[in-house]
Every structure is written in C-alpha cells, then in structure tokens.
Image (spheres, coloured by chain):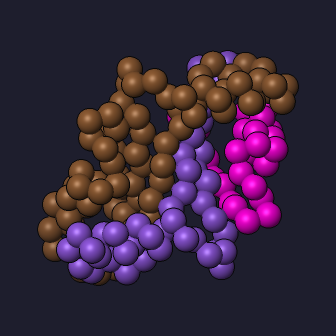
Chain colours: A purple, B brown
C-alpha cells in the first residue's frame, strides 16, 4: 500500500508572504543567521493499489492540491 | 550555506480535520482508492553557518514552527 508524500510550494518569483512573516518571527525570537524562509504545504496520501501511480498523483496535485499557476509540487512514493 | 527542510504534522491520534477534508475533496473529484490523507506544513530555511545546526533547528521547531503539544516535526539538512 503506497504512501505518497507531496510538497507544494510557491513557484520561484511568487511573493511568499507567509515565509517572510516566519522569517521575521524567527529573527524576533533571536534566531540570527536565517537568510530566507519559504513556506509550503505537505500532504501524506495513502493509496490503494500501485497501477498508474504517477498519473494518479499528478492528477491529484494538478487538479486539487496545488494551484499550478503559482505553485509547484514534488512528491515521492514510499 | 545549509538549507533545512522541515515538515510539521499533527501527532498520531490528533484529529486531522484538514486532512479529512482533503480526503473527501479527492473522493468527490473521482479519485478512488485514497485510504487516508494527512495534512501538514513545510518550511525551507536557508541558514548561515553550520555550527550547532541541529540545536538551532530544534530550537526553531520547538519554539516557533511546531506546537509540540499536538504536532511533531522532522527535518533534513541539504
């Protein structure tokens, strides 16, 4: 029974306001030496069956989990 | 210049309402064969310097990025 781990992040060049806020928060808490923070979403999906796995995962990502206009996704299957 | 990739998820046993909503959404879109979805947050943090790296990352996670009462985190350094 495969588990798919998907990470969705904003595309490079798209303003990452949450990441910037987290960056400032870390600095305010005294964490020096943080150069950049990018924020994203994570999904762990347990699937039945192994046929057409990549196709199914890509459909889920492009049709629902990620907004591919501004976001990119990657996944691995474990 | 190390980059740390942090994944924060709810601890097992804590109700994952977003995960359940995403699960239902996938089913409504016709994605059969999804057994479970867990949702989480993802952070990519670029750091200066490499000294005390694990200590620094754990401090950030436990003091800010994760609510360790109900969430767990893991990270890798690339």
From the viewer's perspective, is B75 left or right of B43?
left
Above or below: residue B12 compared with residue A12 = above
From the viewer's perspective, is A20 left or right of A23?
right
Quarter of the picture holding the N terminus of chain A = top right
Q: Position of residue A61 (x, y in %)?
A: 73, 45
Name the residue: 67% across, 69% down.
A11
Residue at the right extreme?
Answer: B30
Q: Position of residue B47 (x, y in %)?
A: 32, 75
Given residues B30 and A24, the one toward you in this image is A24
Above or below: residue B68 compared with residue A74 = above
Given residues A59 and B28, the one toward you in this image is B28
Q: Quadrant of residue A44?
A: top right
Q: Is residue A38 visible?
A: no
Q: Quadrant of residue B65?
A: bottom left
Given residues B68 and A63, the one toward you in this image is B68
Name the residue: 32% across, 39% down.
B72
Name the residue: 54% across, 46% down.
A42
Instruction: Decide whether residue B56 is among the magenta residues.
Output: no
Above or below: residue B7 compared with residue A71 = above
Q: How many marks?
A: 0
Name the residue: 39% across, 54% down.
B6
Q: Which residues are magenta?
A: A52-78
Q: Is residue A8 visible?
A: yes
Above or below: residue B28 compared with residue A12 = above
Q: Position of residue B16 (x, y in %)?
A: 50, 28
Instruction: Decide whether residue A66 is among the magenta residues.
Output: yes
């Amino acid at each position: 029974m495969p588990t798919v781990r998907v990470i969705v992040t904003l595309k490079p060049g798209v303003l990452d306001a949450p990441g910037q806020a987290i960056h400032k928060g870390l600095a305010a808490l005294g964490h020096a030496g943080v150069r950049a923070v990018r924020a994203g979403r994570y999904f762990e999906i347990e699937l039945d069956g192994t046929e057409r796995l990549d196709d199914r995962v890509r459909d889920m990502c492009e049709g629902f989990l990620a907004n591919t206009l501004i976001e990119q996704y990657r996944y691995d299957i474990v």
